[in-house]
Amino acid sequence: MMKDVSLDVAALVLLIILVFSCIFRKMTSGVSNRIYLVILLSAIVATVFDIIAVTLDNADSRNDFALYAAHSGYLIAHYLIAPLHLFFVISLTDIWHKLRRNTILQMLIFLPSFVVMIAFILNINNNMLFSVKYGYERETWFPMLYVAAILYVIYDIIYIIRYNKMFDFDDIASITAVLPIYIVAVTVQAFFPNVLVGMFGIAVGLLIISIGVQRPEDYIDSFTQLMKHSAYAHDMKRSYYNGKHVNIIMLNIANFQSIQAMIGFDLAMHILKEVADKIRQINTEWSAGAELYYLDNGRFRLVFDWNEYSKAEDVANVLNRELKNASFNGLDISLEPFIVLARCPEEISEFKMLMSFGADFHKKNYYTGQVIKANEIFNQNQLDIRNNIDTIIEDALANERFQVYYQPIYSLSKDKFVSAEALIRLIDPKHGYISPEALITAAEQNGAIHKIGELVFEKVCQFIASDDFEKLGLEYIEVNLSVAQIMNSDLPDKLFAVMKKYDIAPDRINLEITETAAAYAQRVMTENLEKLTKAGISFSLDDYGTGYSNMKRVIQLPLKIIKLDKSFVDENNNPKMWIFLENTVKMLKDMNMEIVVEGVETREMLNAFSDLKCDFIQGYFFSKPIPETDFVEFISKQNNKAS
Ligand code: C2E
Ligand code: MG
Ligand code: MG
């Protein structure tokens, strides 16, 4: 009976289109993409051999060698799709490193294919699988090919169930949709050898995978052609989940936003593309094999294998040098590459931390122009703190370890201390002093900030309600509010409830908000400020001069006090800065705002700002933040001396 090859031809066309689609959509790098391509190629080889074999069969060819070669080519290539499919599924979860360590698992995976390959070799002499002597015939042991293939399908299913958490829903849907198609196609062909539906079924299955699993739009950034933020998040989450060790170069172009503001979106994107090309080129030149990502806002990531730390170090140094000196045809632009090299999970123990890692680096004085190693900027204790900050906070809340310190604020006109800023302090039994910045940043991320904020506010109210406060002649306490707190619509009611509990008059409280918070023109925040101001609570703008104050926003806010930031104040020796400070102070005074100068450390600074007619001075010159009892002692001594 003649066999019809038209379904095979259709399969061949479909498979070739899929190969081109992979190439055009740039789905050729990364382990799973490469395995997918290998599957496509074996399917093409199998189909071509099938067409040849069937044509020879139909022509009743007696060329035994050609018949044998064509049929074995087809059977081997066809068979290989089953184990390759399993590798593809494994590659989606990236647990090769576990597989490498587990010999039993390796045996289980490789044994069926090993046996099948031996059978193919033996078949040359004993024709146990198939023979071509009287035309192509399946022999006694032929079903063993089905058994081996079915074994791989079972492995697939077990694997997907075992690691279901690590697959996206779309992945699972398309991989599992493929299995019944394969099974039906192969079964039909097993019982009706003249219906050549097998390869066509496989081609359709591969098409479904291509649509469902390979979504370049989810993973490839169209400007840089590097993998996107979502791919980085996906891959890193998987590494952390699997306990896989990697080395990561985090490259942030620190001045990217100002570059974009200066030269516009199109040119900035052009520069990004060139940076991406440079990264790709260095990756190739150094045979580094790093996976490359572009997150957004000038942030790139290069992920290296765990044993490639020294190569990662070399690549980081080359990148640093080349990017600093890069010129962009005619544009007078120099990049500020900010590069951190980290071992994960040793130096950054949690996925969540990795994703937010480095966001605050350029604000601190870490930048030296050199590549920064995560283990150099943080000593082991600081690393431990960063790695365990969530637990440290949880523990501190449970064991009431948080304390509130007070830093005195001096009134120049009244010549005495009239208030203080409440500042949180935490001494952890294991790690010692935890910096408030690290604490607040982490608490904002994990949501603990609301509890911490309430706790600080309650302690402040307790202090104001005490006899000491009244006796010391203090007027109010400044309390820091974080952005997350101001954005919370429950904030006013919570504060009112505590004030009511301790019977605190609203003019005893001044809330500090930062410039960053002020920059959010957000409804909830505006409503909160209105409600609290109406109730008689006043506000300060903290850290004035550090952010990018939108003056219009600042003017619109109901602010009583502006706090000049320390970094700004430190530059008072710079004559131009001084002119700027003089004018700023005058402008703010004309707007009827009061001014606190923060970070005053010397008598010289005190005199200078006193001449400028600022209202209040806060800084180490008078006192560091100190515990409540010390503060009470300090103020009673100082204010009595003054009077
Ligand atoms: P901030 O609100 O600007 O607080 C002033 C910071 O400057 C304090 O650091 C203070 O110790 C420091 N400082 C004051 N005078 C001087 C000086 O003369 N020289 C130097 N070098 N530093 C001075 P601290 O206590 O480490 O707090 C850091 C930041 O953490 C605060 O900056 C504030 O943004 C945040 N923070 C602290 N406590 C709280 C809190 O209870 N809630 C919230 N949301 N944030 C807080
Ligand atoms: Mg403050
Ligand atoms: Mg401040």
Image (cartoon, rainbow, N blue to C red):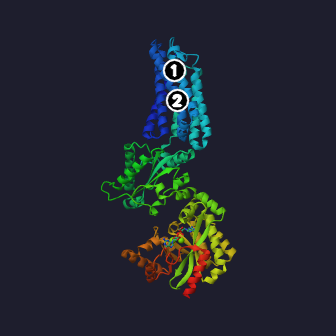
The residue shown at (62%, 39%) is: 162
Where in the figure is residue 154, as x and y percent of width and height?
A: 61, 31
- Residue 276 is left or right of residue 415, and the answer is left
Element class at badge 2: helix
Q: Which residue is mark 2?
A: 81
Where in the figure is residue 88, as x and y percent of width and height?
A: 52, 36
Residue at the far right: name it. 501
Q: Judge whether 220 appears above or below 565 on screen.
A: above
How many residues crowd around disc 1 within 10 Å: few (fewer than 14), some, or many (20 or more)?
some
Q: Judge whether 12 appears above or below 509 on screen.
A: above
Where in the figure is residue 453, as x and y percent of width and height?
A: 61, 67
Q: Nearer the viewer, mark 2 or mark 1?
A: 1
Where in the figure is residue 28, as x and y percent of width and height?
A: 44, 39
- Residue 32 is left or right of residue 165, and the answer is left
Q: Which mark is residue 337?
A: none
Viewer-side residue, 140 vs 40: 140
Q: Which residue is mark 1?
A: 120
* Residue at mark 2 to residue at mark 1: CA–CA distance: 16 Å
Label 1 lies in ligand 1 vicinity (Cβ under 8 Å):
no
Q: Identify the image quadrant of residue 102.
A: top right
Q: Amino acid at mark 2?
A: Ile
Determine if residue 416 is in view. yes
Q: Amino acid at mark 1?
A: Phe
Element class at badge 1: helix
The residue shown at (47%, 48%) is: 247
The residue shown at (55%, 58%) is: 385
